[in-house]
Image: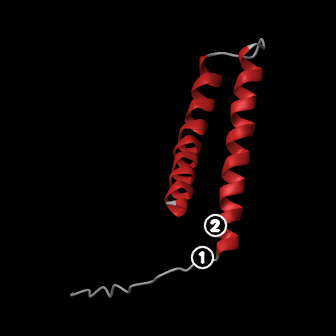
Amino acid sequence: MLTVTALTNVQNTFSVEQVVTGEVLATISLIISLSMAEVLVESKWWNRWASNTLEICNTPLLVVFAEIVAFKVLLVL
Protein backbone atom coordinates (compact mmCIF):
# COMPACT_ATOMS: atom_id res chain seq x y z
CA MET A 1 0.00 0.00 0.00
CA LEU A 2 1.39 3.38 -0.98
CA THR A 3 0.72 6.28 1.36
CA VAL A 4 1.08 9.81 0.08
CA THR A 5 1.45 12.62 2.55
CA ALA A 6 0.62 16.13 1.51
CA LEU A 7 2.61 18.86 3.17
CA THR A 8 1.04 22.25 3.36
CA ASN A 9 2.69 25.53 4.06
CA VAL A 10 0.74 26.94 6.96
CA GLN A 11 1.73 30.37 8.14
CA ASN A 12 0.36 31.67 11.38
CA THR A 13 0.18 35.37 11.82
CA PHE A 14 0.29 36.94 15.24
CA SER A 15 -0.91 40.37 16.10
CA VAL A 16 1.29 42.82 17.96
CA GLU A 17 -1.01 42.59 20.97
CA GLN A 18 -0.47 38.82 21.21
CA VAL A 19 3.30 39.21 21.04
CA VAL A 20 3.31 41.93 23.70
CA THR A 21 1.08 39.82 25.94
CA GLY A 22 3.49 36.89 25.57
CA GLU A 23 6.43 39.11 26.42
CA VAL A 24 4.72 40.42 29.54
CA LEU A 25 3.70 36.93 30.70
CA ALA A 26 7.21 35.55 30.17
CA THR A 27 8.78 38.46 32.06
CA ILE A 28 6.34 38.21 34.96
CA SER A 29 6.85 34.43 35.13
CA LEU A 30 10.61 34.90 35.24
CA ILE A 31 10.38 37.48 38.02
CA ILE A 32 8.08 35.26 40.10
CA SER A 33 10.25 32.19 39.56
CA LEU A 34 13.48 33.97 40.48
CA SER A 35 11.78 35.52 43.53
CA MET A 36 10.61 32.09 44.67
CA ALA A 37 14.14 30.76 44.32
CA GLU A 38 15.53 33.59 46.45
CA VAL A 39 12.91 33.10 49.16
CA LEU A 40 13.23 29.31 49.22
CA VAL A 41 17.02 29.33 49.52
CA GLU A 42 16.70 30.56 53.10
CA SER A 43 13.87 28.22 54.09
CA LYS A 44 13.96 24.75 55.57
CA TRP A 45 12.29 23.30 52.44
CA TRP A 46 15.27 24.07 50.22
CA ASN A 47 16.94 20.91 48.95
CA ARG A 48 18.52 19.57 45.78
CA TRP A 49 15.14 18.66 44.27
CA ALA A 50 13.77 22.19 44.75
CA SER A 51 16.94 23.66 43.33
CA ASN A 52 16.83 21.48 40.23
CA THR A 53 13.14 22.09 39.68
CA LEU A 54 13.49 25.86 39.81
CA GLU A 55 16.56 25.70 37.58
CA ILE A 56 14.62 23.70 35.00
CA CYS A 57 11.85 26.32 35.10
CA ASN A 58 14.16 29.33 35.03
CA THR A 59 16.42 28.30 32.17
CA PRO A 60 13.82 28.50 29.35
CA LEU A 61 12.43 31.72 30.83
CA LEU A 62 15.91 33.26 30.83
CA VAL A 63 16.40 32.25 27.19
CA VAL A 64 13.05 33.77 26.23
CA PHE A 65 13.85 36.94 28.17
CA ALA A 66 17.21 37.24 26.38
CA GLU A 67 15.45 36.84 23.04
CA ILE A 68 12.90 39.50 23.99
CA VAL A 69 15.68 41.93 24.90
CA ALA A 70 17.59 41.14 21.69
CA PHE A 71 14.43 41.66 19.62
CA LYS A 72 13.71 45.00 21.30
CA VAL A 73 17.33 46.13 20.67
CA LEU A 74 17.02 45.16 17.01
CA LEU A 75 13.79 47.15 16.74
CA VAL A 76 15.55 50.24 18.05
CA LEU A 77 18.50 49.87 15.67
Quarter that holds the N terminus: bottom left
Q: Could you tell me the amino acid type at mark 2?
A: Val
Left or right, 61 with reference to 39: left
Q: Which residue is drawn at 61% across and 31% down?
A: 53
For disc 2, the marked residue is 19
Asked whether disc 1 touches disc 2, contact meaning CB atoms under 8 Å apart, the reply is yes
Number of residues whose C-alpha sits closer than 10 Å to that of mark 2, classed few (under 14), some (14–19) or many (20 or more): few
Q: How is the image coloured?
A: secondary structure
Give coordinates of residue 3: x percent, y percent.
Answer: 26, 86
**Label 1 SS:** loop
Give coordinates of residue 27: x percent, y percent.
Answer: 68, 48
**Label 2 SS:** helix
Number of residues whose C-alpha sits closer than 10 Å to that of mark 1, classed few (under 14), some (14–19) or many (20 or more): few
Q: Could you tell me the amino acid type at mark 1?
A: Phe
Q: Decide: is 69 above or below 8.
A: above
Q: Which residue is drawn at 71% across and 45% down?
A: 29
Q: Which residue is drawn at 53% across and 46% down?
A: 66
For disc 1, the marked residue is 14
From mark 1 to mark 2, how far is it between C-alphas?
A: 7 Å
Give coordinates of residue 74: x percent, y percent.
Answer: 49, 59
Q: Nearer the viewer, residue 1 or 34?
A: 34
